[in-house]
Image (tube, rainbow, N blue to C red):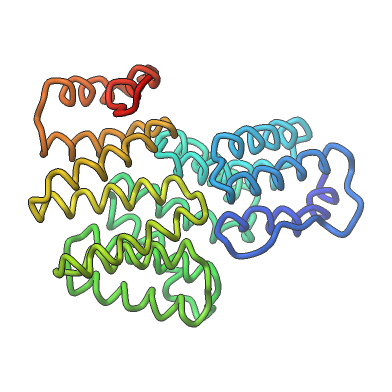
Amino acid sequence: MKQSNQKTKTGLIILAITWLNMACVSSPNEQQPEAIEAANNDLSTGVNHYNDSKHELAISYFKNALHDFRSIDHQYGIASSCLNLSKSYLSIGDIDTADAYIKQAQRIIKRENIKQLNHHLRIIESSIAIENGQLSQAQEILHPLLTSDNSNAFTLAAIQNRTRIAHASNDKAEATQWTNTFEQKIKSSSNNQTYKARLARFKASLSDDTKTQNQYFDEALNMYRSQTNRPGIAATLQEWGDALIAQDQMESARDKLLRALYIRQSLQDRNNSLKTLNSLAVIFNDEKTGTWIGRLRNKHFKKWDEFIAAFSLFPA
């Protein structure tokens, strides 16, 4: 099995980092045993679906790959599949499931000493810590990537997460510093639209000028739309809606938040749907909004069709 593991490492590394927008999907040069080839193909297809923002389909293929790799005890493939699944669940706001898969990947990577996947692991671990509000822990996880002499695509991903930490810490000076660092890194190393959209959101958050803020949000929204990036679109609409609440533009805020809510409902993103409902409650603290906030606090919530219908402005 060690020989088979070695044969497939190159292909699996490339597949694993594709969702970080660092390389194109490709296959190993050597002929693979049939079982490994099938699992590799599922990983590749899953990556393509993830990059097309078809997260549910991506998860289905990554699970198939995980099943196939587990059936032949292919530890490297199992770890790669768990990393991809964690990233996919994180993208749709299922933090608990993302955390469960990252713990499995972490255990295998440590036990098998799979150093090639350590950077992937750190990026996802830090993202989960940020989502859970564990900012100091996230910063500690990222430290080796930010202080390394090597400058690569992992460095850019780490700087993005470090910028998120600075913004979440509500320290404007630090947030400005890291936003500038992120911008310079993008200019020197990446033309990726997802990073550029995230930068526009950071800049919108820093701006005190309403017109400038709106321009940055609109810029981010258009870039995410061009990629059909549903989580990115929803996050932008959410942040824009919250900014409009602060400007006392409640009708415009309500419009943005309801649009964000529908996307999050369609992704069955419970955590972020709760976040949007809490923002809507600032605008109108009605019984309906309060009722659904209570229902979504249940981790086992499943009534998505009913939830969508309750807030839909379109005729049935």
Q: Nearer the viewer, residue 258 or 235?
A: 258
Describe residue 297's horizontal placement relative to residue 156 as left or right.
left
Residue drawn at (28%, 50%) of the image: 134
Q: Nearer the viewer, residue 30 or 301?
A: 301
Q: Quadrant of the C terminus?
A: top left
| Residue 19 placement (x, y as % from top left) | 58, 54
Residue drawn at (73%, 40%) of the image: 42
Q: Can you tell which quarter of the image residue 288 is in?
A: top left
Residue drawn at (49%, 65%) of the image: 193
Image label count: 0
Q: Nearer the viewer, residue 314 or 140?
A: 314
| Residue 306 placement (x, y as % from top left) | 34, 17
Query: Taking 99 as reference, is 310 above or below it?
Result: above
Query: Taking 155 as reference, is 170 above or below it?
Result: above
| Residue 70 placement (x, y as % from top left) | 71, 33
Q: Can you tell which quarter of the image residue 255 is in?
A: top left
Residue drawn at (76%, 45%) of the image: 40
Q: Quadrant of the N terminus?
A: top right
| Residue 135 placement (x, y as % from top left) | 28, 55
Residue placed farthest to the right in the image?
A: 31
